[in-house]
Image: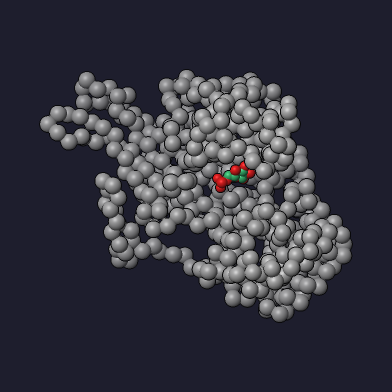
Amino acid sequence: MSPEELRHGPGLKFSIREGLCIERKPAPCGLVLFGASGDLAARKILPSLQGLSSQGLLPADFFVLGLGRKPVDEAELRSRTPGIKNLHYLHGDYDAAETYQALGRKLKELSGKYDTRGNTIFYLALPPALFHAVTHKLGEAGLLDESFGGWSRVVFEKPFGRDLTSARALAAEIRDHLREPQVYRMDHYLGKDTVQNVLMFRFANSIFEPVWKRTYIDHVQISVLEAEGVGHRAGYYDSSGVLRDMFQNHMLQLLALVAMEPPANFAADSVRDEKIKIFQALKPLTPTASSQSIVLGQYAGYRSEPRVSSGSTTPTYAAMRVEIENWRWQGVPFYLRSGKALLKRSAEIAVVFKHVPHSMFRPLNPSNLEANALIFRIQPEEGVSLTIEAKKPGPKTCIGALTMDFDYAEAFGEHPPESYERLLLDVMLGDQTLFPREDALEETWRFIQPLLDAELPLRSYDPGNWGPAEAERLLGDQGRSWRQP
Ligand code: BG6
């Protein structure tokens, strides 16, 4: 390794060394894209496949077979996704047996033509109401059967159920047709480079882990704030709300990455085994406890959004104090908040350390000195910051907070890639590390369910703000405050 380049940030000089890469190459395969003419395919999946193709990361023997209800011209589809030459399309009803027979025939033909050895990914970019039926029909048609040599993997998009009961029913249906190693549940937050960086920071360095515990950490804040309202997804969102949409998945996954014990290796089950222990250690939020530990909000004007019911009580914001009942985190609150129509788009994890135990800089008290904080900026200004107290220049004794700032775009000369690229590549590689396992769904729904059942007050907040004022009280009571991104 040699220093690749030196860059100078404002007030900071740092060098980037060439990274050590773990080389992985996917086997030949075909990808069947259900919902190929839909929004998710157009916005995320096809562009990410194109991105992988332009980086030479797709297998040499590869094809995409789009499947949708509407007839689509193959040539037109190819012209929209120029990076993928071997692109085909089939149309049919998702619940008709003929669709799956035609799919079987087409797969046989394409697998021979492109030499993909029967390895197939079925990507269900479909409304969740279709998951049961499509999985069932694929199974019935024998397309998930791996006994002929090739592998079959199925990718599901969230939401995985809308409560504990429906999540269990979906899990049972999936289990009827697939073994867990065939199942890839997307949580696109885990595909973000800046989220994976939490693992690199924690487990590829020796200086953080010794202080990563209740003795030194005061609290953790995880914020995923969005400036946009519900927009064109109002129909789905109104029957879902922020607890199902963000907390059961992304927010709790982020919490697990910060809180879990060091896994023995970067392998799917080692990582997922550690995450599950965190979910199991979450202190349940009972209805009484939850009124003090959770604040729900809805932005003013939400009820007049198209396709939102006029009397909707769907929360578009939630903030909560979560406790993890284990040795490492005893007494360390994790504050989580997420909402729509806020002042600014910003997602970050802030690990806030304790004040110094004693101040030798009299008359300054320990609490006059700003506590250190390590901030993982997930988006949009991706990077990591560490705030430390330092001497300000001059003959007087002045102490002030200094921020050491690593800016992703400045350091690497580019913004992080689309998270779907990484996750699609992992599906091809058969690497489930960044995909929630069935037991994680069970545990996260179990944690969220009492909050869905409880009748909690819904606070109104003005769009373009930081959410309901009551959310401040969650921390304010403890002499802490939310960080302003
Ligand atoms: C999705 C939610 O999973 O994540 C959306 O359904 C949310 O409501 C989105 O806006 C946020 O993702 P990102 O990557 O834009 O932060």
User: In the image, is 209 to the left or to the right of 313?
Assistant: left
User: In the image, is 198 to the left or to the right of 156?
Assistant: left
Between 278 and 348, the one nearer to me in the picture: 348
| Above or below: residue 284 compared with residue 5 | above
Count every numbered label the image shows and give the total.
0
Q: Is residue 327 visible?
A: no
Q: Is residue 383 visible?
A: yes
Q: Residue at x 40, y 53 (%)?
A: 409
Between 265 and 240, the one nearer to me in the picture: 240
Q: Say which quadrant the C terminus sits in.
A: top left
Q: Residue at x 29, y 28 (%)?
A: 369
| Above or below: residue 107 compared with residue 231 | below
Image position, residue 299 (x, y; %): 60, 29
Image position, residue 103 (x, y; %): 80, 68
Image position, residue 378 (x, y; %): 47, 46
Between 380 and 364, the one nearer to me in the picture: 380
Image position, residue 210 (x, y; %): 37, 42
